Image (spheres, grey):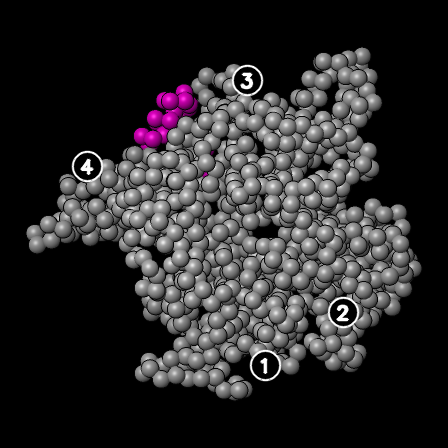
Amino acid sequence: MEKHNQIELSSDEFKKVLNHLDKGNIFERAKRLRDKMELTRDDGSVIYLEFINMEHWYQNQYQVTHQISQKGRYKNRYDVTLLINGLPLVQIELKRRGLELKEAFNQINRYQRHSFWADNALFQYVQIFVISNGVNTRYYANNRKQSYKETCYWADENNQLITQLEDFADSFLEKCHLSKMICRYIVLHESNKVLMVLRPYQYYAVEAIIERVKTTPKKGYIWHTTGSGKTLTSFKAAQILTRLPNVHKVVFVVDRADLDYQTSREFNHFCPNSVDTTDKTKQLVKQMAGTNKLIVTTIQKLNTAIKKPRHEAAMEALRNQPIVFIFDECHRSQFGQTHKNIVKFFPKAQMFGFTGTPIFADNSVSNEHGKRTTKDLFEDCLHKYVITNAIADENVLKFSVEYWGKLKLKDGSLITEPKLDRDFYENPQRISLIIDWIIEHHHRKTHGLKFSAMLCVSNVDTLITYYEIFKQKKQQGEHNLRVITIFTPGINEEDDDANGLIGDPDFDIKNTASSSHSRDKLADFIKDYNDLYKTQHSLRDSKAFYAYYKDIAKRMKDRDREDFKDQERADILLVVNMYLTGFDVKKINTLYVDKNLKYHGLIQAYSRTNRILGELKSQGNIVCFRNLKDHTDEAITLFSNENAKEQIFIEPYEHYIEQFNQGVEELRAIALTPNDVNKLISEDDQVDYVKAFRKLMRLLNVSKSFTEFSFSDLDIDEQSFEDYKSKYLDIYDRTRNKPEEDDPSPVEEIDFELELIQRDEINVAYILRLLAKLQRDRQDQAKQEDYQQKKADILNIMGKEAQLRSKRELIEKFIETRMPDLTPDEKLGKVFSDFWDEERIEAIKKLCEEENLIEDAINKMMENYHFTGKPPLRDTVLSACIHKPKLLQRKKVFERIVGKLMDIITQFDDNLGDFEEVE
């Protein structure tokens, strides 16, 4: 650091630097790294220390070191660390060839918990992690909230992956390139307070745009497949372009529907007041004439600004300025008069578009401006990353597509799809049968409601029929799904099957005779929404309608937040066109289709389901209630190539069953029966068993998503599979509950992927209902002999459900100590609730005694956690200590107390369900 700043520091001055650096979380430290430090020197003079040269990233000091040891909670040794100006900014973790790369990812997570916070927590300044087993190498930003699936490979400009460690080191770890990635291509995501690093195709796209603006006046477009992070790429491009001296302003143009709360927050964090969220064009004109270099607005308002005479004087001064326009999702809103108006008004502007589905000659539409393609509007494609690239890189998921053109009537006969018959498609009997199918299979498709689905239909009248039949069946007790909907009243044209366009959302609410029926219906549906979620939306005007639209978008997007409450979820979002393009929600995994889709409209709609999210979401599920197979094949050919179907769609059901049954053979070669797992003494044998059973879980997870799934197709019965699962969880518990050592065992490094096991419906309330039945059997003389076996079965269920294992001992205690004394007039749920509260109070008391804590303060922390979903802060925890720990002990004490506190919350408050009413 002295060399970089060309200065010598005294010991006291250097202590000040370390104290300055030892503050905040990872995100706050990333900001501190990029700022200068005002240092008051021993002689009273003031200097500014730079930690990294962001502007000239190659002018920094580089060092490589390895086997750094740190002792936090446990002693750890790190493989290779890259230092820039003396700070550890890149950490590389290496595994032997043949070992799973995920083990290196898990090891870094362990370092985060155990030792990165030691010694002034300088390792919390790491910006990029690299993991490699020699053959495969991946990188990712220092973001604790991401899964292994969100790590990525580096690649060349043509999307050829660079996986070998030596090749990766030559291209990615070259010091100028690495500095550039840290200084220019890490995004500090303000909304979620995390670091993000660009993937290779995003990097090449931004570099291409910057080079274009620096060297030519030409336009260009980026073709990056839907779901690959175009908005992040375009955001980063806009951010860098504002710093170029030859750029007057950067205007980021979106459709009104895309200017949601998240886009607004991110851009405003980067450039205050850059987002024009008002309804008035006057605000945009004021911004355009002002000093802001970055403006985010809608295409609709931009068009008004250049067309209306009252804005002419203010806008005229900008006419010949070098302005860069970036159009997000440029396959929409760009092919009418609006684009011509913008190009004509700003003759010196440069236009760049981002799209996942370009308009080619094959899928272009004729209008009064003729047939126009993306190339006509934006000239050259500057970088291409198509859906087959993204699937090969594991950046988006494959699709599972089912076609249900034939529906079975109650008498067993089939109704088949005619070529084109609106009366057939809109027949309530047909719609009712489709809803019955969805009710029957929705839990399976969404892994027990862990994910949401969308259902798109052909027009507003059909949507109303769908919604009302769903509602009727719910009132009759046929399902408990939360169905929400939105549409524009009065817009009811039948889909145009000829072009595949999905219309842009229309938020203008007009009170006309033709719209009165659908308007009244939507008002009723919004009332249902308000009753369900305790909101106060209305349809009084366009502004209120847009607020309802944004609330639905936020509800769907927020579901993947850590603090999201399940009672806020929506299960099925029913639409005509809204949200079918540009709507990025990780927790949507299923799309039901009852409308004609084609070309880019089809790819856009399907792609609502293919965002990566952990192991449980293994593919995007598409269920077509129309015969869209030919249209699907055409779209895949157009946007990748004619041989791409095998890469884009998952294998047929039979493939996964065959793979599963092969896996059963491999499992039995390790442990012939579940009890044989107990004989696996060596850790290597246990690792082999865990990997073999985990493979079966992954395959079963995919297989169960097929409608035709049956356990009878598998070479193992369901009970045996559950018994093997119980042994799998036993190994997990043993490795996680023993004291951690300096060198973890091979079993500890494995990811057990427990998300493939957890099922929220098997909660405490479910167990309590079984206990209520058990209690009735106990009082029935004829059934008493089965009592012990049924009790054992219930305890066995808790052993198999990962989220109930921590509760098992307490529930056993309840069975033994409280249930024998129950009287017939007592409610089991009420007695259990009292018991649970007593045990919870006792657990908190025990924690306070062990750690010398103030009980009221701990109770307050737990209340706050349930309200915010966030663990308590360090100062809050330390202030609850009766005797304040010494300075060097505070981190350990804090981590230990929070760990115990979270254990109590997991044991007593998670996965309970509603058991108060159990009789």
Q: What residue would you read off at disc 4?
A: 817
Residue 685, position in %: x, y?
Answer: 39, 40
Residue 681, position in %: x, y?
Answer: 34, 35
Residue 657, position in %: x, y?
Answer: 40, 62
Q: What residue would you read off at disc 2?
A: 374
Q: CA distance from mark 1 to mark 3?
A: 70 Å
Q: How many marks?
A: 4
Q: Please check the rendered image and state whether residue 842 is part of the magenta-colored stretch, yes or no.
A: yes
Dot 4 amino acid type: Thr
Q: Is residue 154 visible?
A: yes
Q: CA distance from mark 3 to mark 2?
A: 62 Å
Magenta segment range?
841-865
Q: CA distance from mark 4 to mark 2?
A: 73 Å
Q: Residue at x 60, y 46 (%)?
A: 136
Q: What residue would you read off at disc 3?
A: 887
Residue in front for this viewpoint, 166 or 41? 166
> Dot 2, crowdedness within 10 Å: few (<14), some or many (≥20)?
many
N-terminal-most mark, 4 or 2: 2
Residue 314, position in %: x, y?
Answer: 87, 58
Q: Quadrant of the N terminus?
A: top right
Q: Is residue 527 visible?
A: no
Q: Residue at x 49, y 51 (%)?
A: 615
Q: CA distance from mark 1 to mark 4?
A: 66 Å
Q: What residue would you read off at disc 1?
A: 494
Q: Is residue 556 left or right of residue 348?
A: left
